[in-house]
Image: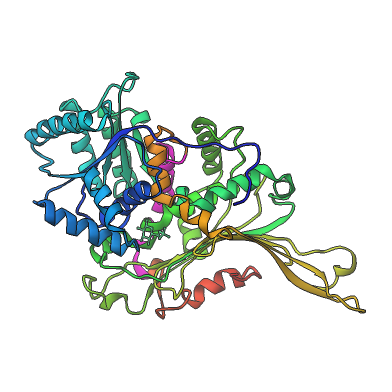
Amino acid sequence: MQETLGFCQETRPESCGFILFGATGDLAGRKIIPALFGLCEKNIAPKNFYILLAARTPLDRSGLESRLRASLTKAGFTPSPESFSAFQERTEYMQADYESEDFYKRLSLRLAVLDARSGVKKKRLFYLAMPPAAFEPIVGRLKSGGLLSDPEDCSCWSRLIIEKPYGASLEGAASLDAGLKTSASESQVYRIDHFTGKETVQNVLALRSANRVFEATWNNRFVDHVQITVLEELGLEGRANFFEHMGLAQDMMSHILQLAAITAMDLPATFRDTDFKAEKKRFFESVHPLDREAVVKQSVRAQYAGYRAEPGVAPASPVETFLAFKFGVDNDRWRGVPFYVRAGKKTGLKKTRIDLVYKKPDLGIFKHIDIGYPNVFTFNIQPDEDITFSLVSKHPGPKLCFTPRSMRLDYRADVKEAQSYPTDYERLLIEAMSGDQTLFLSSFEIRFMWEFLSSFTGTWKGGPQASPLYSYADGTAGPAEAADLLKKDGRAWL
Ligand code: BG6
């Protein structure tokens, strides 16, 4: 195991109860339940900790057991009988009727019993894995049922995690936010975007902060352009209903903007929540949403060829499964540097990466020779987890010839250590249990995301005449038009 240096901060989750609403839903089954298991398995869950799953579906003990097993198996776990039963012992189920006051009364009594049994002092993390329309009424009832503690009271806490979509439009998101704030304070609301919890995304900031050699060139004097790639091999995975309402842009925009911010924001003075959010906000304030003309000229939306034949998809669905676009950042650091983004489903491979492409040399012996872009700084976020820096060096031998080379820092070199570090959801759950909101989104960021997104969706409402929906073959990295977006600027996707 490699040694760590100097600054080494550990997040310590507090003993608490974890209450998952929507526990039989897709998000809970795919992400949250496996993350809870992972925390227990890796021994990073709090010492005193219980899990209460709640959903409308009636479930007895054996029904719960088969759901837990199915969810863990799908997530790739093969728990030993001991670790499964230890997890099961911490986990209870309660049938929910979110509209009835009686449910919240019963919930309150049940939590009091679980608190007492587990040695937890009224510290409760509620995860609302529900559609956004349910957030406000549920939070209102938690409040009126006495289940949301006073944020000023230091002896106990109640926190709420909510997940995208945060509303269904800019106006809807604003009213959801205002509605939530009538019952809960900002310090109690944790808006999750699981990309911020990815180990390799955090490393972007760590690397930038610790190594001045990069920070000095992280600007428009040296960088020609930035590419953000979020391609997925998977298609709908049975989520046609969700995806038909969302489309790729709505589904992925928050993730894309978070990657952009972490790459390009100025470094905060500290990694404390307020400093970090203030810098992120300054970054977003420098990104102007595209106007209608820019959306038409600088973006490409497309659908994979087999999409309309997927179960649950409308035969003439206009929903995009791929989006590429270019945007700019109007600040001294990045003015003039284009940021190119592409994201899509069914592209034949999973590839999430960020590339900083440095300018070509235009002095000395290379004044009149185009050797392309010799320096590219790449953060492979997933599935590869590494950092590479490409450069040109002399080819060994008697002649003076230049060869492209790449330096690679493998993030998973120590496999054993890698297996013990938390996954994205695991990390974010720990952060919420420890009361640290740094990696969660502010309401400003949600509003900005909707404003940015609305430029696209508003233009697309004009139909294919306003902005065509291209097609790409399943298993390919998007339509030819996405390549043209860079080609016309004399560049290419990496
Ligand atoms: C989710 C989207 O937020 O992120 C999914 O709803 C997408 O459609 C997923 O597949 C990608 O996340 P990850 O961590 O698997 O890259």
**Horizontal side, residue 439 vs residue 156: left or right:** right
**Looking at the rendering, in which quadrant would you find the C terminus?**
bottom right
Q: Position of residue 376 (x, y in %)?
A: 68, 63
Instruction: Place residue 232 in its image quadrant.
Output: bottom left
Q: Is residue 406 visible?
A: yes
**Horizontal side, residue 180 vs residue 232: left or right:** left
Q: Position of residue 159 (x, y in %)?
A: 31, 33
Residue name at image x 26 percent, y 27 percent: 122
**Horizontal side, residue 24 vs residue 326: left or right:** left
Residue name at image x 51 percent, y 37 percent: 10
Considering only vertical position in the picture, is 249 above or below 305?
A: above
**Horizontal side, residue 295 vs residue 178: left or right:** right
Considering only vertical position in the picture, is 227 above or below 177?
A: below
| Residue 451 lies in the magenta stretch | yes
Considering depth in this image, is 315 or 109 the residue closer to the camera? 109
Outermost front residue:
82
Considering depth in this image, is 69 or 188 the residue closer to the camera? 69
Considering only vertical position in the picture, is 295 above or below 428?
A: below
Read off the magenta span: 439-464
Residue name at image x 13 percent, y 33 percent: 104
Q: How is the image coloured?
A: rainbow
Provide the major secondary structure of the magenta segment.
helix
Residue name at image x 10 percent, y 39 percent: 99
Q: Position of residue 69 (x, y in %)?
A: 23, 59
Q: Position of residue 334 (x, y in %)?
A: 65, 49
Considering only vertical position in the picture, is 28 above or below 277?
A: below
Q: Is residue 332 visible?
A: no
| Residue 139 lies in the magenta stretch | no
